[in-house]
Image: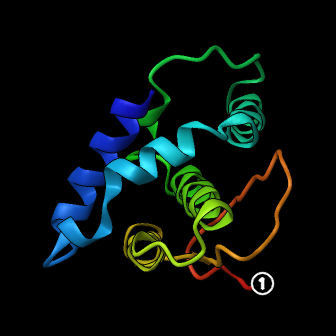
Amino acid sequence: MIGAIRDYLEFHGRHCFRRPAEARFAEVAELFAQDTDFFRQDLEVRHAALSGEAFAEARWVDRLDLEPNLEAVFLYRCSRAVYLREPEHPSLLHLARLMKLRTGGEIYFRSAIGPRLRIVHSAGIVIGA
């Protein structure tokens, strides 16, 4: 799981930022992987809404490019996991910018949002602390 998350973040980070090395996405992937329970519940809600079936954990990272709403939730969960462990981590601003560029939405990493978050339309959404 860590490898897939790191690949996703590094790929999109490289294409969105001039100096992606500052973001330290490998650390972000490791911090997020320690706390994936909320996101797993978010995936279950999203999957049930789309297919009416129970979620089977497959290559969910591949779906992020196809579903900006799910991508916004994923990037929020990543940034929140980092913030809770290291509030001054340099990747936080990169993750916020990546979310805005990729999904058109902004969910502030200081926002405490419980499990089973479902965003129907991410473009233009702003959720502050």
Residue at the location (75% across, 52% down)? 118
Query: In the structure shown, which secondary structural element does the residue marked by tag 1 occupy?
Result: loop
49 above or below 69?
A: above
Q: Is residue 125 left or right of residue 14?
A: right
Q: Is residue 64 left or right of residue 42?
A: left
**Where residue 63 sits: x, y (%)?**
45, 37
Query: Which residue occupies the extreme left position in the image?
Result: 18
Query: Which residue occupies the extreme right position in the image?
Result: 114
**Where residue 12 sits: x, y (%)?**
26, 58
Camera sees residue 80: yes
Q: Which residue is mark 1?
A: 129
Camera sees residue 62: no
Of 85 and 110, nearer the camera is 85
Q: Quadrant of residue 113?
A: bottom right
101 above or below 42?
A: below
Q: Amino acid at mark 1?
A: Ala
Of 87 and 104, nearer the camera is 87
Query: Which quadrant: the C terminus?
Result: bottom right
Q: Is residue 38 left or right of residue 21?
A: right
Residue at the location (71% across, 77% down)? 110
**Where residue 39 sits: x, y (%)?**
68, 41
Residue at the location (70% across, 39% down)? 46
Of 39 and 49, nearer the camera is 39
